[in-house]
Image (spheres, grey):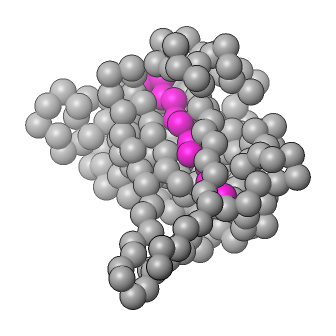
Amino acid sequence: MILAKNIYQSTKVIPLGSTAFRQPFADSHCKFLHGYRLQAKFWFSCNQLDNNNWVVDFGSLKELKKQLEDAFDHTTCVWRNDPELPIFQLLHEKKIIDLRVFDDGVGIEKFAEYCHNIADSYVRNSTDGRCWCEKVEVWEHEGNSAIFEKVILTSTTETIAITPETTPILPTETVQDNPTFVSKNLTSPMATKTETNNVPPLYGKKVINTFKDPFAGTSWGNNNRR
């Protein structure tokens, strides 16, 4: 007997912002601080549509966008194991950079994982578990991207469901006497409830998308987005 189950999917592209980072142990020029205009594509899934026959209401994702912009828009993202972390902290204290410290590494692969965990927690909470985030793709530019996906493993006898993490977001910490330094746990920002972090404001910056549209000519290009 073959068992089938309906799965609906919808996608959303969200600009993350202009982000600087580096790979401190790379042998290439990636060891130097450099930046990209990052964008992310999210796959949302469900087994049952809502009353509007939607997987997820795109208009309800505004708070999710804010959380992602806080992590990436005009920020410098540094791995906690970067040997030059004290220098980046000093630059933040001098208001030269807006620092975000990641416990688990930086780069578009890790950024895709981070965005997935944020989005999965967010839509599960906002839909009472009806919806989840299937996967996330993050672009550095139109030529480079990375995908993170949490896969459900199956066998002939059982289904192993990978449940979302429940590691809470750590509160804002301070460095020395500077209360504006943001040192978050950016490894697994999954929480049982959607939270708004006590973080410095983005100083009124508005995201302006100057990224070349990699989706032109597709069914989800600029002219067809909600």
Q: Residue at x 52, y 73 (%)?
A: 3
Tell me: 96 left or right of 51.
left
Q: Where, by quadrant of the figure, is residue 163 drawn?
A: bottom right
Residue 137 to residue 17: above or below: below
Tell me: 91 left or right of 105.
right
Q: Residue at x 32, y 28 (%)?
A: 144
Q: Where, by quadrant of the figure, is residue 65 drawn?
A: top right
Whole-percent x, y for residue 178 in the image:
61, 48
Quarter of the image where the C terminus is located: top right
Magenta stretch in the rendered image: 36-46
Q: Residue at x 27, y 49 (%)?
A: 83
Residue 143 to residue 197: above or below: above
Q: Main secondary structure of the magenta part?
A: strand
Whole-percent x, y for residue 175 in the image:
54, 54
Report the residue that reaches farthest toward the left: 27
Q: Is residue 200 visible?
A: no
Report the residue that reaches farthest toward the front: 1
**71, 8: nearer the viewer:** 8
Whole-percent x, y for residue 164 in the image:
56, 70
Residue 42 in magenta stretch: yes
Q: Where, by quadrant of the figure, is residue 173 drawn?
A: bottom right
Residue 105 in magenta stretch: no
Residue 7 to residue 67: above or below: below
Whole-percent x, y for residue 30 in the image:
23, 31
